[in-house]
Image (cartoon, grey):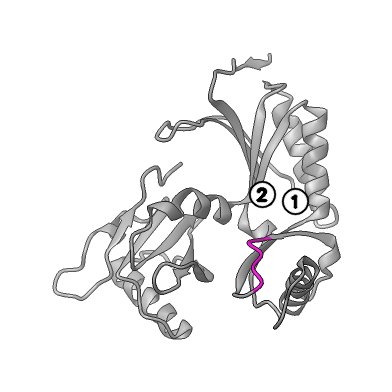
Amino acid sequence: MRNVFGQRFGQCLCIDVAPQAVSVRRVSRWRGAAPDVLAAQAIAPSADHPFDAIGNALRALLGELDVQSWPVSIVLADELTRMWRVTPPPGAARMADLEAAAGFRFQSLYAEAPATWQISADWHASQPFFAAAVPRDLLAALHGVAQDCKLTIVAIEPRFVRAWNRSRRGLKQGAWFGHVHDNVLTLAAIEAGGTGLRAIRPLPIPLGADHRWLTQTLQREALLLDVTAPSLLQVQGNAPVNWFKPVNGVAHIPCTALAGSAA
């Protein structure tokens, strides 16, 4: 029996795509409204055709929902994507120069041909910028699913990029940003003066990680980057509750949750 979900004004679908599972949520465009999980589907592993497996799982999932003509945003697990920092070449004056620099840096970091990836970035000719890439075969599979299910794709974003875009305007001076998902803290170190991203670090969260671990981790990352440690960490996602509790008698870096952090 098909489930019927009537669309209301200001609502859209959000499809979460990971190598192991996909899920569909109904979300409101109005800030503060909790998402409504409609369905989830595990993915049978396929080493040879992983993106076909994702597409098949999505078709099976969406086939049980009456969601034709809905607008949909797609959030990709960070392990399906690539993110890296690009330094523009001296005298860069054309978009082609920046695209070539991003492609060369991608190939040196990941030892993969950039032609098989769709690269986007906050292109800048005079200062370093961050780029993100998604496999073209994955994009083709997602667009094929949307066409078959008569959905309109409005956005496809890596999970961290989505979290950063939704949260960066709420960051305080001197704070760094963190996104927590699947026991991984993706840490965004912010340039002094809040001028932009300095680095993005995915860090596994060990079992029992408390505020002491968090403070030591932030201080270590600051040393590695040769920058001042943050005065505050603002997080989005399902962070451990004890990160928000200071350790008595021990110097620590405060941690606060951003509004709507669990969405």
Q: Is residue 136 above or below residue 152?
A: below
Quadrant housing residue 218: bottom left
Question: Which image quarter is the N terminus in?
Answer: top right
Q: Is residue 100 left or right of residue 31?
A: right
Q: Quadrant of residue 17?
A: top right
Residue type, numbered disc 2: Gln
Residue 177: image x %, image y %?
A: 42, 62
The location of residue 3, given as percent across then percent down, is 63, 17
Give residue 145's quadrant in the image: top right
Mark 1 vs mark 2: which is more N-terminal?
2
Which residue sits at x=74%, y=25%? 63
Q: Which residue is mark 1?
A: 45
In this picture, is 9 found above or below 38? above
Nearest to the observer: residue 146 or residue 204: 146
Q: Which residues are magenta?
A: 121-125
* Mark 1 secondary-structure assignment: loop
The front one of 200 and 53 is 200
